[in-house]
Image: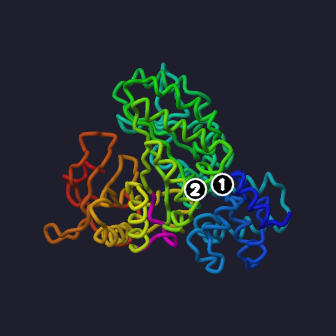
């Protein structure tokens, strides 16, 4: 069967066939790439996880625009994601046919300097139960618990800026993964202030519905929970999951059951670019999801080379609202992974957000941003102003480890080059308490 016919057959059957470092060379798109670009992808993918699928490659990437196409940048590792000396070292080892253990050792060293678990995820977010750390759970904010089911710690396609990239590289000590829900349920019963569980990954919707159901069903019996969220990118990168997939109807029935139980079900979908909303299949998936009573909330970071343009965000949010989705968050790309490649200065993030927001109707102005998920909490950039002759950022916490800090404005000295919270300096002594 020719590759293009095989892709069509996979699409009809709704089976997600992964494209990764081992088999990307078999695709016609790979054959058309410049050899230096091929080599860059081969080298960087030794260090950073790479996975795509034929839907992304055939429907979302404009190969005439490669390497500048935003979905290509989102999916395929790029040479400049590593420092030059790191790239050259890995390239040389591969060229020499070095022992794979030596290559893995160098890859681990590079990953270690990339801040694989930002924001205190491993050190401060993992709760305990009867003196035991619950390694598949995070609890940072009082009302919300994050749950990482073991079977959902992969994705239909990996985003190159993903702040959870460490979940995918095979290093056990860096992974969050829970085998079952017994400990989660016990922990929730001990913590009645928790009203919201976010099932995340990876992507929980890579699991078969029968497996996902085993994680969800116990939560429906907990009266304290008002909402269940599922963090996913499946509607953007594999909409077959809700349309032609082998158990697409089953997952929609599960969504319906959650809603009928009296819980609010929200799919927190990472839409990176309007192109992900442009295909008939993507729009059909949204209609089917919404028909169950579940809501779709749109969130994603600003990333250089992908969506660092106000017009892109205006289009994304307007299109989302037209399709019945709720614009929710514009994030600042986290301080992890190849941050040097994607990061956008905070001042520019604000310009992009404000430039997009002013062209939106009220229905799309539900979106909050730019927001940094930093160690103390979600830091919301409200803009800039002058205070006592000094230009400052105006900030607030939308969520915080210390709930008393939430929605209290504070100020940081303006710096046009700063890209993350820990690079900011308090504007006054009073503001130091917020840092």
Majority secondary structure of the magenta segment? loop
- Residue found 20% across the figure and 68% down from its top: 385
Q: Would residue 311 be found to the left or right of residue 242 on screen?
A: left
From which residue to which does the magenta span run?
Answer: 300-309
Q: Would residue 316 be found to the left or right of residue 388 on screen?
A: right
- Residue found 30% across the figure and 49% down from its top: 398
Report how far apart the C-alphas of labels 1 and 2 lie in the structure. 7 Å
Q: Secondary structure at mark 2?
A: loop
Please state which of residues 280 and 78 is positioned toward the viewer in this rendering. Answer: 280
Residue 409 lies in what quarter of the image?
A: bottom left
In percent of width and height, residue 13 lies at 72, 52
In percent of width and height, residue 271 lies at 49, 59
Q: Would residue 401 be found to the left or right of residue 14 on screen?
A: left
Is 418 in the magenta? no
**In this view of the protein, can residue 211 be seen by the observer?**
yes
- On the image, numbered disc 1 is attached to which residue? 109
């Amino acid at each position: 069967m020719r590759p293009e016919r095989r892709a069509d057959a996979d699409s009809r059957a709704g089976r997600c066939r992964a494209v990764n470092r081992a088999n990307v060379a078999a695709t016609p798109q790979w054959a058309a790439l410049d050899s230096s670009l091929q080599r860059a992808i081969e080298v960087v993918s030794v260090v950073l996880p790479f996975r795509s699928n034929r839907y992304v490659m055939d429907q979302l990437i404009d190969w005439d625009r490669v390497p500048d196409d935003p979905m290509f940048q989102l999916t395929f590792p790029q040479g400049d994601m590593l420092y030059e000396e790191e790239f050259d070292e890995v390239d040389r080892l591969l060229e020499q046919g070095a022992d794979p253990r030596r290559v893995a050792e160098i890859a681990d060293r590079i990953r270690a300097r990339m801040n694989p678990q930002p924001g205190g995820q491993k050190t401060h977010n993992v709760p305990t139960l009867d003196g035991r750390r619950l390694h598949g759970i995070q609890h940072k904010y009082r009302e919300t618990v994050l749950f990482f089911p073991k079977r959902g710690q992969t994705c239909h396609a990996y985003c190159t800026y993903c702040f959870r990239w460490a979940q995918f590289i095979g290093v056990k000590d860096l992974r969050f993964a829970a085998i079952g829900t017994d400990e989660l349920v016990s922990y929730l019963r001990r913590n009645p202030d928790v009203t919201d569980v976010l099932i995340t990954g990876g992507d929980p919707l890579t699991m078969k519905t029968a497996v996902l159901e085993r994680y969800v069903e116990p939560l429906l019996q907990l009266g304290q929970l008002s909402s269940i969220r599922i963090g996913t990118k499946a509607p953007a990168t594999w909409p077959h999951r809700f349309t032609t997939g082998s158990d697409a109807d089953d997952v929609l029935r599960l969504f319906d059951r959650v809603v009928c139980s009296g819980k609010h079900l929200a799919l927190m979908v990472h839409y990176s670019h309007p192109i992900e909303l442009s295909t008939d299949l993507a729009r059909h998936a949204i209609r089917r999801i919404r028909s169950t009573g579940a809501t779709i909330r749109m969130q994603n970071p600003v990333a250089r080379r992908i969506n660092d343009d106000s017009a892109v965000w205006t289009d994304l949010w307007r299109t989302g609202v037209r399709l019945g989705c709720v614009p929710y968050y514009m994030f600042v790309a986290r301080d992890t992974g190849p941050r040097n490649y994607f990061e956008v200065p905070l001042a520019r993030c604000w310009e992009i957000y404000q430039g997009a927001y002013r062209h939106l109707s009220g229905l799309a102005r539900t979106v909050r941003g730019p927001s940094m998920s930093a160690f103390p909490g979600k830091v919301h950039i409200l803009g800039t102003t002058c205070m006592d002759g000094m230009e400052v950022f105006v900030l607030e916490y939308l969520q915080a480890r210390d709930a008393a800090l939430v929605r209290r404005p504070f100020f940081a000295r303006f710096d046009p080059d700063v890209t993350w919270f820990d690079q900011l300096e308090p504007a006054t002594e009073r503001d130091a308490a917020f840092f």
